[in-house]
Image (cartoon, grey):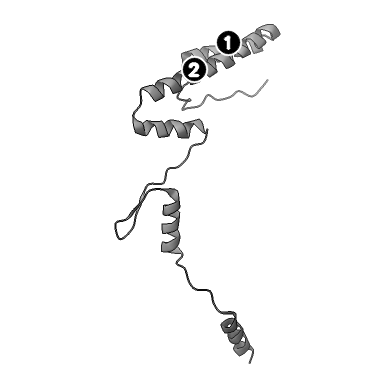
Amino acid sequence: MPKQRVPPTKPALWWNHTCQEATQARHHAAINDDAPSINALTNAHCRIIKEEKQDWVTHAITHSKYADIWDIAKWSTGQRRVVVPPIISEDSTTYMDNTNKANHIAATYFPWEPPISIQIVQDNNLRQWE
């Protein structure tokens, strides 16, 4: 007997009752080994999923606020990204984009030091062996 999949606790934003019915119909056809029905239901399932995604995105874009559009853009990549909040420095400068954040963190925790002269290193090594 095939391993049973556990339904996700948090379904996709576009998932609705129509998608659930299409999935169940395809699953029941697979259990009954009805090959022609499986093919037809699989095609219908894919079409329904595609249409529901398109309808959800269209509705979300037309009825959303400006800030919500960026959430939709993140969702479309299929990856959940952790958004790092803005960084405020000691002099009250706010760093919003990732490049400035990275530069500020690097400058704060890894300050630039001039390279050590090779001659100084060689002199120190020679003194240790004397």
- Is residue 26 rendered to the left or right of residue 85? right
Badge 2 crowding class, 10 Å Cα cut-off, few under 14, some 14 to 19, many 20 or more, is: some
The amino acid pointed to by label 2 is Glu
- Residue at the disc numbered 2: 52
Q: Position of residue 37 (x, y in %)?
A: 65, 7
The amino acid pointed to by label 1 is Ala
**Closer-to-camera residue (48/11):** 48
Identify the residue at horizontal 43%, vertical 62% (top origin): 107
**Closer-to-camera residue (37/123):** 123
- Residue at the disc numbered 1: 25
Q: Quadrant of the C terminus?
A: bottom right
Q: Is residue 78 above or below residue 90?
A: above
Mark 2 element type: helix
Mark 1 element type: helix
- Is residue 48 rendered to the left or right of residue 61? right
Identify the residue at horizontal 41%, vertical 46% (top origin): 84
Q: Quadrant of the N terminus?
A: top right
Give the mark nearest the N terminus, 2 or 1: 1
Tag of residue 110: none
